[in-house]
């Protein structure tokens, strides 16, 4: 699964890509998302799907969650729309392709590498936590 911690090292690269490339997306289903109103306040707003939006930024929130900022293309009553990474992948067709281009990495390969690393870490922790590990270490 693509997680926020896998995206973190690519934050600046994604931001540069967003600034350089103009991409337009549409929400593919009804949803509720956080919006920044023109008066500076935030609130949840319902969308019906099909609203055209354009990415403008990425940042990591309080919980180290990757949040993508989009601006509406059509005149709207809000200034920005914020969507966390996991929701953006659900709500926006072609978002994975956009991330791959921005990061210059195949997401599938990135997730497989992360799973292997996690498995190796867990396996090493399991081996080291085995009481007989210390007795067997260096016994050859």
Image (tube, helix red, strand yellow):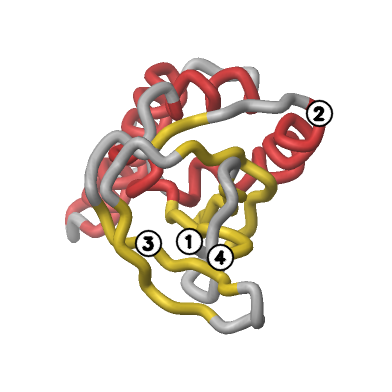
User: Mark 2 Cα within 10 Å, few/some/many (few <14, many 20+)?
Assistant: few
The residues bearing labels 3 and 2 have C-alpha atoms spaced at a distance of 25 Å
Q: Between 68 and 76, which is closer to the camera in this rendering?
A: 76
Q: Quadrant of the N terminus?
A: top left
Marks 4 and 1: CB-CB under 8 Å?
no
The residues bearing labels 1 and 3 have C-alpha atoms spaced at a distance of 15 Å
Q: Going 52% across and 54% down the picture, which residue do you hit?
A: 66
Q: Secondary structure at mark 3?
A: strand
Q: Earlier in the sequence, mark 4 or mark 1?
A: 1
Q: Between 138 and 92, which is closer to the camera in this rendering?
A: 92
Q: Secondary structure at mark 1?
A: loop
User: x, y (%) of residue 10?
Assistant: 66, 38
Q: Going 37% across and 72% down the picture, which residue do you hit?
A: 44
Marks 3 and 2: CB-CB under 8 Å?
no
Q: Secondary structure at mark 2?
A: helix
The residues bearing labels 4 and 1 have C-alpha atoms spaced at a distance of 22 Å
- Which tag is nearer the camera, tag 3 or tag 2? 3
Marks 1 and 2: CB-CB under 8 Å?
no
- Residue under circle 1? 65
Q: Earlier in the sequence, mark 1 or mark 2?
A: 2
On the rendered structure, is 98 left or right of 136? right
- Residue under circle 2? 20
- Which tag is nearer the camera, tag 3 or tag 4? 4
- Residue under circle 3? 33
On the rendered structure, is 51 left or right of 47? right
Labelled disc at residue 78:
4
Q: Between 92 and 129, which is closer to the camera in this rendering?
A: 92
Q: Going 36% across and 39% down the picture, which residue do you hit?
A: 27
């Amino acid at each position: 699964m693509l997680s926020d911690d896998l995206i973190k090292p690519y934050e600046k690269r994604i931001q540069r890509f967003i600034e350089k490339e103009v991409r337009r997306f549409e929400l593919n289903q009804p949803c509720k998302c956080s919006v920044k109103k023109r008066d500076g306040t935030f609130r949840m707003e319902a969308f019906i799907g099909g609203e055209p939006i354009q990415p403008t930024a990425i940042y990591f929130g309080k919980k180290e969650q990757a949040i993508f900022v989009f601006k509406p293309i059509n005149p709207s009553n809000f200034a920005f729309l914020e969507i966390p990474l996991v929701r953006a992948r659900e709500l926006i067709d072609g978002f994975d392709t956009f991330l791959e281009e921005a990061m210059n990495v195949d997401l599938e390969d990135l997730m497989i590498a992360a799973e292997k690393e996690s498995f190796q870490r867990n396996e090493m922790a399991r081996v080291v936590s085995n009481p007989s590990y210390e007795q067997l270490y260096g016994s050859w």
